[in-house]
Image (cartoon, rainbow, N blue to C red):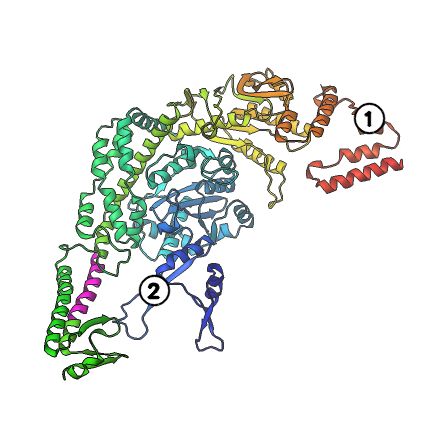
C-alpha cells in the first residue's frame, strides 16, 4: 500500500510505515503485509469498517510485454465477505440496499456467502419507521442507499443512532429502470417482478453494487424471494430488544436469549435458518401447522431423530462452501469438505424414507444425492491436500494421463540423478562427489579441494566456495531441464485441472443449493423437536380464533437459567371479548414482567412452528407483537427516559390492530404521579375502546383496577405474595383481583439500602397512607399531609399571606428534566426565600 492508503493502513493494522523512491521530491509512504497472511489483515480492516480493494496480476508474466498488467480483481466490504475466517458460522452476513422513492422504500437484503437474496416494498403507514424496523430484523453489516435516502438528513440521523452498519451512497444511475431491468433479467430466469414497486430498484441497485465490487458473475444469486411485511409477525426493534429474541438486552450475548434456548442444530446452515425463523414468525396458519406437524413427527420418533442428528453432525456448511466455489475462492480442502458432506446424503435419505408428514416428505424430495458431484471430487482430489493450489500434489494419480506422465518424469528424474552421481564417481575416481540442487543454480556437482586434480575436462565451473567447487555438465543440464520442466508443467497442469473441476461443480449450483436448504430445514425441525423433548414442551393449537389460552405456561429462558429454584407456571386466558385487557398489579420482583414476556414468547414460538413451554396451549394468530418494557433513555438523541417511553407507546397505539398482542409495563412511571396515572388511564381506554387488541398491562397505579366493571373486557390480576412479619415471600402466582400494595420498601431492603433509610421510609409511608386520595369531578386531589420534621408547603406555607409565589414556583418545576445540581440550587433558593419572610 502506498501514499494515503499506507498512512491509514499502518495505523489501523499497527504495522511499520516505510517509504520508497518514486521520482518525486519526497519518498512515497509505503507499508505491506505478507501475501500469505493477507486474509488476516483484510479481516482486521473490514472489522474497522474499511473497504479493501485487492489488485493482482491479470496476465502471465512470461508472456507479458513490458510491465505486467494489474487490475482490481475484487473489493472486499463488510457485507460482501465470503472468507469463513471472517464470518460467524451461525449468523448470516447481510448486506442491505435501500431505495427511497418519495415516501416509499424498497429494501433488498442479500447474504453473498450463501447466495440468499430477498426483497420487499414498504408502502403504507410510517414507512420510515417500518423500514428501520425491517433493518433491525437483519442486523446488516453493510447498507447502501440511493442518493435520495442518503441525502435525507433526518433518516440518516435516525439510522446512525440505531445501527452500527457500514453505510454508503451508491450512484443514482445504478437504480435506473433500464439498468435494473437488465440486471434482474440477467440473474433471475422468472422475471416476474413489477417495476412499479420500489423493491425492483432496490434489487437492481444491489446487483449493480455486487457486480461492481465482486468483479464476477453472481451466479449463485439465482433465486429471489419477494415477500410482503404482512407475511410475518410484525415486531418493532424495541420489542425485539425487550423480548431478547436472538441476543440479550444487557450485553448482546447469545446466551440468555430465546435463540440460545431453542438452538440444538447440528449444522451451521440450520443454526442460521433457525435464527431467521425466530426473527420472522409466520402468520399463515397452514404453513405454521405444517411445521408443527413435522416437529411432532420428529418429537415422537426418538430413534429416527437421533440417527438424523448424528449424520447431520458430520455435514459441513454446504451453503458457504458452494458460495466459495461459485466465487472461485474454494480450495482443495473446501472440495473435500463438500465431498464428505455429500457422502452422508444416502444415509440421511434412507432415514427420511420413514417420514410421513407432508412437510417432511416435501423436504426429503428436495435432497439430491449428488452422486456425480461426489464421484468427481472423489476421483480427482487427494484426501489430505495442501492449502495452496499452486504447490502441486492436489490431483490423484490416474485422474489425468498428462499429470501421470509428468509425475513419472519427476519420480524417474530422481533416479536419473542418482545413477549419474554413481557413474561420475566411478568415472572420475572422486569418492565424495555428489549432485545437489538449489533454486538459484539448479542441479550441480560439488567437489572438495582435495580432489581438484581429478576434475575432468568436460566439467564446467559454476561457483567457487571456501572448501569446494561446483560444476555442471551437458548431461546434468539435460537431466535438470527434464526434471524441472516436468515439475513446473505438473504444478501448472494440476492447478488448471482443479479450476475445471471447481467450474464443473459450480454448474450444479441449483441442485446443491436446494439440497443445502433441505438439510438446513431438517436440521431446524429436528432441533425444535429435540428441545421440546428435553424441556417438556407441548404442541400448541394454532387457529384463527381470538384466544390465547395457556395452561401452566413458563418463560423458556428464565426457567432454563434457574439453578436451585423451580419455575412457577401460570395460566393465561385472553380473547377479544370478555378477557381482552388484563391489568396486572403486584409487588416489584413478584414476576409481572416475566409473566407478560412469557405470553409473548410462547405466542411467537408457536408461530415459528415450535412446541411451547406449557402443559397445553391454544394460540389464535397474532399479527403484531409490541412491548413497552423497562426504562431507558437516549441521551445522544436528546431524549429522556419518559420521552423514549412515550415514543414507544405512540408507535404501539398507531400501528396495533385487533389481532395484535400488546405487552405494556409501567406506562406513565417516568413523570409525576398524576400525569403518569392520567396517561396510563387514557392509554388503557384507547386500547380497549379503539384498538381492541389482546393486552397485558402491568402497573403500580392501583387506581387503574377501578376500570374492571367500567370497561368491557378489562380484568384485574395480581401476582400473589405471602407476608411473614416484615418479610414478604413472592409466590410468583397470578391470581384474579388487584394487589394491596407494592412492597417497594421490602425490595429496597433486599437490594441493600441502609437500615436507617428503610426505617425513615416506613415512617413516611405511614404518614402518606393516612392521606385520602379522592376522585372529584374527574380530577385527583390530595388532602393535606403533614410529615414529622418536614414543612407542608401546600398547606401551612401556602396559607400564609405572600407565599402564593412559592407554591406557583413549585407547581411549575419540571422535576423529571432537572439534574441533581439544579434541584439542590432550586431547593436552596426556596429555603432562602422562606427564611427572608
Residue located beneath label 2 in the image: 56
Q: Magenta stretch: residue 482 in it? A: yes
Q: Quadrant of the C terminus?
A: top right
Where residue 356 appears, as percent x and y from the top left, is 25, 26
Along the line of sight, which residue is nearer the eye, 193 or 146? Answer: 146
Which element type, helix, strand or loop, lies under badge 1? helix
Along the line of sight, which residue is nearer the eye, 210 or 635? Answer: 635
Pointer 2 or 1: first along the chain:
2
Residue under the image location 70 percent in, 22 percent down: 778
| Horizontal arrangement in the rendering, residue 174 relative to residue 417 (left or right) | right
Residue 424 vs 111, above or below: the answer is: below
Residue located beneath label 1 in the image: 795
Q: Main secondary structure of the magenta part?
A: helix
Which element type, helix, strand or loop, lies under badge 2? strand
Where residue 547 appears, as percent x and y from the top left, is 45, 20
The magenta span reads 481-497
Residue under the image location 82 percent in, 26 percent down: 795
Along the line of sight, which residue is nearer the eye, 635 or 561? Answer: 561
| Horizontal arrangement in the rendering, residue 661 relative to residue 357 (left or right) | right
Q: Where on the picture, by quarter, is residue 434?
A: bottom left
Q: Magenta stretch: residue 355 in it? A: no
Residue 621 in view, yes or no? yes
Numbered disc total? 2
Question: 10 Å neighbourhood of mark 2: few (<14), some, or many (≥20)?
Answer: few
Residue under the image location 15 percent in, 54 percent down: 399
Residue 86 vs 819, above or below: the answer is: below
Q: Quadrant of the N terminus?
A: bottom left
What separation in Å lies between label 2 and label 1 (alpha carbons)? 85 Å
Where residue 649 appears, as percent x and y from the top left, is 57, 33
Question: 10 Å neighbourhood of mark 1: few (<14), some, or many (≥20)?
Answer: some
Where residue 22 appears, as percent x and y from the top left, is 43, 75
Residue under the image location 54 percent in, 27 percent down: 593
Amino acid at each position: 500500500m502506498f501514499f494515503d492508503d499506507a498512512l491509514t493502513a499502518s495505523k489501523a493494522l499497527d504495522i511499520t510505515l516505510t517509504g520508497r523512491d518514486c521520482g518525486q521530491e519526497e519518498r512515497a509512504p509505503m507499508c505491506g503485509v505478507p501475501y500469505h497472511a493477507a486474509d488476516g489483515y483484510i479481516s482486521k480492516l473490514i472489522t474497522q469498517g474499511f473497504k479493501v480493494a485487492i489488485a493482482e496480476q491479470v496476465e502471465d508474466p512470461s508472456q507479458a510485454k513490458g510491465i505486467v498488467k494489474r487490475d482490481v480483481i475484487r473489493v472486499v466490504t463488510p457485507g460482501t465477505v465470503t472468507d469463513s475466517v471472517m464470518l460467524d458460522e451461525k449468523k448470516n452476513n447481510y448486506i442491505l440496499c435501500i431505495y427511497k422513492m418519495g415516501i416509499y422504500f424498497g429494501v433488498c437484503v442479500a447474504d453473498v456467502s450463501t447466495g440468499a437474496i430477498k426483497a420487499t416494498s414498504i408502502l403504507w403507514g410510517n414507512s420510515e419507521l417500518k423500514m428501520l424496523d425491517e433493518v433491525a430484523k437483519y442486523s446488516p453489516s453493510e447498507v447502501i442507499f440511493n442518493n435520495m435516502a442518503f441525502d435525507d438528513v433526518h433518516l440518516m440521523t435516525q439510522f446512525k443512532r440505531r445501527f452500527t452498519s457500514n453505510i454508503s451512497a451508491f450512484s443514482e444511475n445504478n437504480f435506473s429502470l433500464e439498468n435494473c431491468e437488465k440486471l434482474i433479467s440477467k440473474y433471475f430466469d422468472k422475471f416476474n417482478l413489477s417495476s412499479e414497486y420500489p423493491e425492483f430498484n432496490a434489487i437492481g441497485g444491489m446487483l449493480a453494487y455486487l457486480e461492481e465490487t465482486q468483479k464476477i458473475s453472481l451466479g449463485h444469486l439465482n433465486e429471489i424471494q419477494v415477500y410482503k411485511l404482512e407475511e410475518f409477525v410484525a415486531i418493532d426493534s424495541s420489542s425485539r430488544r425487550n423480548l431478547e429474541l436472538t441476543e440479550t438486552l444487557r450485553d448482546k450475548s447469545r446466551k440468555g436469549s430465546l435463540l440460545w434456548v431453542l438452538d440444538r442444530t447440528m449444522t451451521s446452515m440450520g443454526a442460521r435458518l433457525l435464527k431467521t425463523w425466530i426473527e420472522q414468525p409466520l402468520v399463515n396458519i397452514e404453513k405454521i401447522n405444517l411445521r408443527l406437524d413435522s416437529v411432532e413427527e420428529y418429537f415422537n420418533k426418538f430413534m429416527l431423530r437421533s440417527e438424523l442428528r448424528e449424520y447431520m453432525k458430520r455435514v459441513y456448511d454446504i451453503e458457504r462452501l458452494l458460495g466459495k466455489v461459485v466465487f472461485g475462492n474454494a480450495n482443495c480442502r473446501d472440495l473435500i469438505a463438500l465431498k464428505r458432506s455429500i457422502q452422508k446424503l444416502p444415509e440421511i435419505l434412507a432415514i427420511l424414507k420413514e417420514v410421513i408428514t407432508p412437510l417432511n416428505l416435501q423436504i426429503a424430495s428436495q435432497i439430491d444425492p449428488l452422486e456425480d458431484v461426489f464421484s468427481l471430487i472423489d476421483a480427482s482430489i487427494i484426501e489430505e491436500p495442501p492449502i495452496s493450489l499452486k504447490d502441486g500434489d492436489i490431483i490423484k494419480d490416474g485422474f489425468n494421463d498428462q499429470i501421470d506422465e509428468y509425475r513419472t518424469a519427476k519420480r524417474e528424474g530422481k533416479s536419473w540423478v542418482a545413477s549419474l552421481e554413481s557413474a561420475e564417481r566411478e568415472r572420475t575416481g572422486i569418492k565424495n562427489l555428489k549432485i545437489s540442487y538449489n533454486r538459484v543454480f539448479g542441479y550441480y556437482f560439488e567437489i572438495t579441494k582435495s580432489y581438484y586434480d581429478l576434475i575432468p575436462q568436460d566439467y564446467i565451473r559454476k561457483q567457487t566456495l571456501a572448501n569446494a567447487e561446483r560444476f555442471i555438465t551437458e548431461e546434468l543440464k539435460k537431466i535438470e531441464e527434464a526434471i524441472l520442466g516436468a515439475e513446473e508443467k505438473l504444478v501448472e497442469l494440476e492447478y488448471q485441472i482443479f479450476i475445471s473441476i471447481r467450474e464443473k461443480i459450480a454448474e450444479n449450483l441449483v441442485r446443491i443449493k436446494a439440497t443445502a436448504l433441505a438439510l438446513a430445514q431438517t436440521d431446524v425441525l429436528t432441533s425444535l423437536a429435540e428441545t421440546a423433548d428435553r424441556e417438556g414442551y407441548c404442541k400448541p393449537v394454532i387457529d384463527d380464533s381470538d384466544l390465547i389460552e395457556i395452561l401452566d405456561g413458563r418463560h423458556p429462558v428464565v426457567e432454563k437459567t434457574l439453578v436451585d429454584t423451580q419455575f412457577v407456571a401460570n395460566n393465561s386466558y385472553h380473547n377479544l371479548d370478555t378477557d381482552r385487557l388484563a391489568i396486572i398489579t403486584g409487588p416489584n420482583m413478584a414476576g409481572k414482567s416475566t409473566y407478560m414476556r412469557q405470553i409473548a414468547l410462547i405466542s411467537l414460538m408457536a408461530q415459528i412452528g415450535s412446541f411451547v413451554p406449557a402443559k397445553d396451549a391454544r394460540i389464535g394468530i397474532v399479527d403484531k407483537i409490541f412491548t413497552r418494557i423497562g426504562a431507558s433513555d437516549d441521551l445522544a438523541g436528546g431524549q429522556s427516559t419518559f420521552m423514549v417511553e412515550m415514543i414507544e407507546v405512540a408507535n404501539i397505539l398507531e400501528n396495533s390492530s385487533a389481532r395484535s398482542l400488546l405487552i405494556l409495563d409501567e406506562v406513565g412511571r417516568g413523570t409525576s404521579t398524576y400525569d403518569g396515572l392520567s396517561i396510563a388511564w387514557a392509554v388503557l381506554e384507547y386500547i380497549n375502546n379503539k384498538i381492541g387488541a389482546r393486552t397485558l398491562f402491568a402497573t403500580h397505579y392501583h387506581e387503574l383496577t377501578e376500570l374492571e366493571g367500567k370497561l368491557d373486557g378489562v380484568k384485574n390480576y395480581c401476582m400473589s405474595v405471602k407476608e411473614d412479619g416484615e418479610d414478604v415471600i413472592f409466590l410468583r402466582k397470578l391470581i384474579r383481583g388487584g394487589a394491596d400494595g407494592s412492597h417497594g420498601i421490602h425490595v429496597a431492603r433486599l437490594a441493600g439500602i441502609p437500615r436507617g433509610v428503610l426505617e425513615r421510609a416506613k415512617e413516611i409511608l405511614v404518614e402518606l397512607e393516612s392521606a385520602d386520595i379522592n376522585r372529584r369531578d374527574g380530577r385527583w386531589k390530595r388532602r393535606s399531609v403533614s410529615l414529622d420534621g418536614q414543612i407542608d408547603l401546600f398547606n401551612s406555607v401556602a396559607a400564609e399571606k405572600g407565599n402564593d409565589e412559592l407554591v406557583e414556583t413549585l407547581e411549575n418545576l419540571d422535576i423529571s428534566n432537572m439534574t441533581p445540581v439544579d434541584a439542590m440550587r432550586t431547593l436552596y433558593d426556596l429555603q432562602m426565600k422562606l427564611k427572608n419572610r
